């Protein structure tokens, strides 16, 4: 890296991430040919077109909470294809390099001093603090400032609980008639209110440890608390995981105490008994020691404490989770068939076996997938610090708006720069010359094309700090999708231009390395 500071010159970026470069006057590369610098061997896309493809190093790893359900979840720190033209919102919850027409190998820094204009921003390189709403269903409220959503799948499970519990009530309280379904619906709502309390326990613990929580979502198999960062210590990780099942146990005890003075065989008695048992099941299930359940996070914390390495804890808990998934898949139907679970009636046993086999398959799939996602998430977090804006930034040369493209590229070659920043009369950056636009200008027309016609106006979100790295860098790019970003020092001095394609390529390269 060629760094020149304190002499009135802009600091230069690092070209190491970009690979072999073409001469500025060379013909535009054929987009159908793979970029030799791209370690993925992918085709070179048009940087102006969103790339729907994405490497899948992880799906947000759900960790236990709620009913038979995943729980506290870390959001995806991956770029939504940083070079993508659209930011993809998290669902009812990207590695090609652009051809560089820019320059020859680095030989030095341009002899100009230029400062970034940051009016209206929270400081040089600071992306806007306001994030879009995460979404994910019907917004129910914001306890502790965290949005709570009910996913569309919840209405399906609410109808299923109403139907199943209504059938049970018909045998216990036949005098209710059709009103039993109204009582069953009340039970479904009360049960998921208990799940919400479970999730709020995770949320309050996370906020206590200063870990931001993106949202809580109630869905088909319970609830998910999306915690944006990992706990810093194994002790906090253990507490964060344990508070959910603990609250479910407390709720079970509360319903038991409320049941004592109630006459058996009444609607309140049946409802309280059902809520007591369901919360007890939720607590017991979530305490099973395998990811993505709360018990798996607790096991991860214990192994992390013993070994001193969080990755070892994740590996151990994830493999236990996979073993647990197989046990659920095989064991639950066997228990039903043996008569340990289910009815004594032969017909009922046959029906129960089919239903339990289906339930076992769904639960096993959730646990197995969650365990695998947890491994990918840990691997991703292990490599994220390798993504540093300072290391990935291309050296840039400032040019006035009326500078012909050919002259701008000549200056870039002479100074070893690989990007162009259009500056105003006061030397403040106004726009970035788009790489894709340069490629589209034939060589014989470049002396008559001013760089301003190929530039994209700078917005506050397109200015990023040279100090950003890892998740902070990816968050800044996801919040403001673009193909190029102006990288500035904290002093406002231009450091260079960051290509989203370079970030994506470095991301894929880091993920391809073994842990």
Image (cartoon, rainbow, N blue to C red):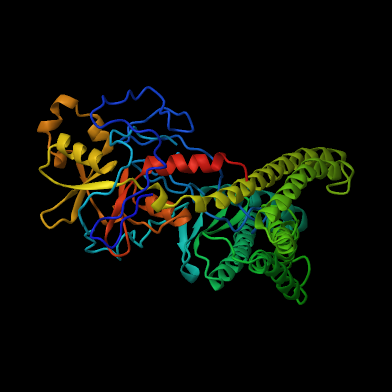
Residue found at the far bottom of this picture: 261
The structure residue drawn at horizontal position 31% and vertical position 25%, both measured from the top left corner, is: 29
- The residue closer to the viewer here, 187 or 335, is 335
User: Residue 497: in sight, yes or no?
Assistant: yes
Instruction: Check the image and report above or below for 27 versus 229.
Output: above
**Residue 115, percent from left and from top:** 22, 59
Quarter where residue 413 is shown: top left
Instruction: Check the image and report above or below for 454 versus 159.
Output: above
- The residue closer to the viewer here, 283 or 287, is 287
On the picture, is 432 further left or further right than 169? Answer: left
- The residue closer to the viewer here, 12 or 266, is 12
On the picture, is 253 further left or further right than 91? Answer: right
- The residue closer to the viewer here, 144 or 459, is 459
Instruction: Check the image and report above or below for 217 versus 20.
Output: below
**Residue 156, percent from left and from top:** 58, 47
**Residue 370, percent from left and from top:** 64, 47
Quarter where residue 504 is shown: top left
User: Residue 81: in sight, yes or no?
Assistant: no
Quarter where residue 107 is shown: top left
**Residue 80, percent from left and from top:** 43, 44
Disc tally is 0
On the picture, is 237 further left or further right than 354? Answer: left
């Amino acid at each position: 890296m060629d760094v020149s500071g304190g002499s009135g010159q802009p600091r230069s970026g690092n070209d190491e991430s970009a690979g072999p470069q073409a001469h500025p006057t060379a013909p535009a590369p054929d987009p159908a040919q793979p970029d030799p610098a791209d370690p993925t061997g992918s085709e070179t896309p048009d940087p102006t077109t969103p790339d729907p493809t994405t490497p899948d190093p992880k799906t947000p790893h759900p960790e236990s909470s709620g009913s038979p359900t995943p729980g506290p979840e870390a959001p995806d720190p991956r770029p939504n294809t940083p070079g993508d033209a659209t930011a993809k919102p998290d669902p009812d919850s990207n590695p090609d390099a652009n051809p560089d027409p820019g320059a020859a190998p680095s030989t030095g820094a341009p002899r100009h001093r230029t400062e970034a204009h940051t009016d209206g921003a929270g400081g040089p390189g600071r992306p806007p603090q306001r994030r879009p709403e995460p979404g994910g269903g019907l917004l129910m409220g914001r306890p502790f400032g965290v949005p709570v959503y009910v996913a569309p799948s919840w209405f399906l499970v609410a109808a299923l609980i109403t139907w199943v519990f209504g059938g049970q009530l018909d045998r216990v309280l036949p005098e209710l008639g059709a009103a039993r379904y109204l009582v069953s619906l009340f039970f479904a709502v009360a049960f998921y209110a208990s799940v919400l309390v479970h999730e709020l326990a995770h949320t309050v613990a996370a906020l206590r440890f200063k870990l931001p929580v993106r949202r809580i979502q109630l869905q088909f198999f319970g609830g998910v608390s999306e915690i944006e960062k990992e706990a810093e210590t194994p002790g906090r990780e253990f507490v964060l995981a344990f508070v959910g099942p603990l609250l479910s146990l407390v709720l079970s005890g509360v319903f038991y105490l409320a049941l004592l003075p109630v006459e058996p065989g009444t609607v309140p008695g049946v409802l309280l008994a059902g809520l007591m048992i369901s919360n007890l099941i939720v607590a017991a299930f979530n305490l099973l020691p395998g990811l993505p359940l709360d018990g798996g996070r607790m096991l991860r914390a214990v192994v992390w404490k013993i070994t001193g390495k969080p990755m070892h804890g994740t590996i151990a808990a994830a493999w236990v989770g996979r073993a647990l998934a197989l046990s659920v898949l095989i064991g639950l139907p066997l228990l039903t068939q043996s008569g340990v679970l289910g009815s004594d009636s032969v017909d009922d046993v046959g029906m129960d076996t089919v239903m339990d086999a289906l339930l076992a398959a769904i639960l096993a799939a959730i646990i197995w997938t969650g365990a695998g996602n947890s491994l990918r998430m840990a691997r991703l977090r292990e490599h994220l610090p390798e993504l540093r804006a300072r290391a990935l930034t291309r050296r840039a040369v400032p040019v006035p708006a009326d500078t012909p493209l050919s002259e701008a590229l000549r200056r870039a070659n002479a100074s070893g720069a690989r990007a162009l920043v259009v500056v105003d009369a006061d030397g403040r950056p106004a726009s970035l010359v788009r790489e894709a636009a340069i490629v589209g200008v034939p060589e014989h027309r470049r002396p008559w094309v001013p760089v301003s016609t190929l530039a994209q106006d700078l917005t506050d979100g397109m200015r990023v700090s040279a100090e950003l790295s890892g998740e902070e860098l990816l968050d800044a790019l996801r919040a403001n999708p673009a193909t190029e970003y102006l990288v500035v020092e904290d002093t406002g001095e231009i450091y260079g231009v960051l290509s989203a394609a370079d970030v994506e390529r470095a991301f894929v390269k880091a993920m391809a390395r073994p842990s």
